[in-house]
Image: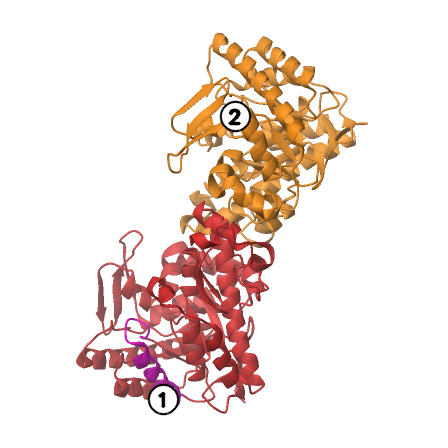
Chain colours: A red, B orange
Amino acid sequence: MNRFFEVRGQNPDSRARTGLLRTAHGDIETPVFMQVGTQGTVKTLSPLELKETGSQIILGNTYHLYLRPGTSVIEKAGGLQCFSGWNHPILTDSGGYQVYSLAGLRKISDDGVVFQSHIDGSSHDFTPESTMDIQLSLGSDIMMVLDECPPYPSSIEYVADSVKRTNAWAKRCRDHFEKMGSKYGYEQHLFGIVQGSIYPDLRRESVSALVDLDFPGYAIGGLSIGEPKPVLFELVETCTAMLPEAKPRYLMGMGKPEDLVEGISLGVDMFDCVLPTRNARKGQLFTWSGPMNLRNAKYKDDFRPIDAECSCYACQQFSRAYIRHLFHAREILALRLASLHNLHFYHSLVAGCRASIADGSFTLWRQRFYENYQISNHTQSTVLT
Amino acid sequence: MNRFFEVRGQNPDSRARTGLLRTAHGDIETPVFMQVGTQGTVKTLSPLELKETGSQIILGNTYHLYLRPGTSVIEKAGGLQCFSGWNHPILTDSGGYQVYSLAGLRKISDDGVVFQSHIDGSSHDFTPESTMDIQLSLGSDIMMVLDECPPYPSSIEYVADSVKRTNAWAKRCRDHFEKMGSKYGYEQHLFGIVQGSIYPDLRRESVSALVDLDFPGYAIGGLSIGEPKPVLFELVETCTAMLPEAKPRYLMGMGKPEDLVEGISLGVDMFDCVLPTRNARKGQLFTWSGPMNLRNAKYKDDFRPIDAECSCYACQQFSRAYIRHLFHAREILALRLASLHNLHFYHSLVAGCRASIADGSFTLWRQRFYENYQISNHTQSTVLT
């Protein structure tokens, strides 16, 4: 039995499965949705509220935390859990993705990435070794290797080179991580990241090289950045079909509720995305009937809760009309209640998957979910991403 | 015995007193600080958190709520308590103050005020009668008469005219309120407002006319708008000395912690101010040692709570270093934790006054408060108002 991860249930009609991830800061039931706490906080919410939504693990962004407040402050505090008051599991990315998406001038070489801070323009560099040191200091329960995420579209030649570099970095990360050991007396874990853009052979090459390095878990990166959805899901299955059954699989940066259900069907165990919280702040709320834009005039005197089936604080105590008013009055409580509700919905969604996989009814559960969850053309065209 | 208000304790060395205000939505221990919930929400906080800070009553702004979401929406919801989820006492102002401070073109006549919305420029008018109708629809436990608040400084001639108009409006408000009766089956109460700027004789004239109208409570308005502090406190005492002992006295729009202690010494029972929440959002935190600006560099790795004596969620769970980080990262949780702490401090401050008045130690309590509460020159010069 794998002490870190255990597969507990398997849907007979798909790759969907349930499992348990054991970390020093608590166990995590999978499939799991991990909300993003970019700067050491999930935007608008407190740790207490996060726990109430059903959150099991938070994702922190190494790039942001390294720049502000700085690794040394978090290290002095005893790690990100102590610093942020979230005394539960934390996963951190390597910082690479934000270097590509946020930093100004940057230069990628085989040694690593040199970049300029988006805050003050100062120059920094991330190497496979330095991103390990930073994540060790952050005290992450699950750390990620430094990788390169090529933009979509990229030529097969570029991606082939990039995959080789990412695999070489993965080995350097693993070696440095093994040399340094955990920082705070509890076990930390390092995941590899599969890249290869939309090229199935390069994806397979990437999986193969990472599996040889024997990580305790594997992420699928470089997707959901513009490629068509059917292509995306085919590539996910290419990866999950090859990845070891006994190790957790994490699809990075996805997605909408329907994407999670699809990903789970394809054997994904872990998800993260800013969508539920970012869209909440723009007034898009997720319900079992589909998404709704609460800013719409039709909710002006609608005194029903956001979702009659939801047990979150926002739905138990406030009406659509009131929360809509808060949005139009630009009140922070609007952002809070919407974020709280959306996260509660996401966690209920994956909890529904978990329960139905466990009792053998996932195929039916998924079918009913799609029947009820209406994505109108109007909603699709105005969807906030 | 006055059913609505009862004086329970009296400090022998000053006018300070404790009392109980009974409303349909709950009893209020006085002296009380009322936080401002301008648009049907106290900025950044939920009703649950407000209750936890020790809040007993919230002030709503008629001008804002009338414009957005509009009186009819709140009436359909069954009043502001039902609409906002704050099922405890609510006091509303008349809307007059915001007309003077926020609205664009406005014209005051003996009949009322015509003004343009600061949101869309549309034209509206408040009369004594219409502000009663609006506040009745809001379901306010305590309503305020329409008044004119002359700017500081204003000539004695202008203020003399203004006081006459305000007193005439007060009578029209009372008459209309008595004619209409309460809206939702529970008792609503109407307070008069003393004006008169810095002119003691006009203040006395105002008090005298309002006392003749026999309101259940009296506010002292038109202060804390630029006049020197010693003048302000002399005028407060001019009013409290003349106002009936058996009726609650409400000093509008004040103030800093030390102002509350002074006001209480002068016999004031109720206060409201945006200062604790507004300054919180700028990083100014109140502690028993005095105010501090949490954005300062010296708190970068200060892992102590804001105030070691404080039992609020912010002080129990988070460090100065973490909350400072949240401020610099522009995270909403910073505004929430700071607002929560400052309101908790304000409510603890008035609770300390109440307890020490009740047990006869208020004079000593006040002396010790001033000894510990350091307002440094630096803090004074950077104070955020």
**SS type, badge 1:** helix
Magenta highlight range: A222-243
Q: Are marks 1 and 2 in contact (CB under 8 Å)?
A: no
Q: Position of residue A361 (x, y in %)?
A: 55, 85
Q: Nearer the viewer, mark 1 or mark 2?
A: 2
Q: Position of residue B358 (x, y in %)?
A: 77, 31
Is B55 magenta? The answer is no
Residue A152, by quadrant, is bottom left
Disc 1: host chain: A
Disc sitting over residue A212 in the figure: 1
The disc labelled 2 sits on which kind of residue?
Thr
Is A230 magenta? The answer is yes
Disc 2: host chain: B
> Is B100 placed above or below A21 here?
above
> Is A64 placed above or below B79 here?
below
For the C terminus of chain A, which image quadrant?
Answer: bottom left
Q: Can you see residue B253?
A: no
The disc labelled 1 sits on which kind of residue?
Asp
- Horizontal arrangement in the rendering, residue B213 relative to residue A15 (left or right): right
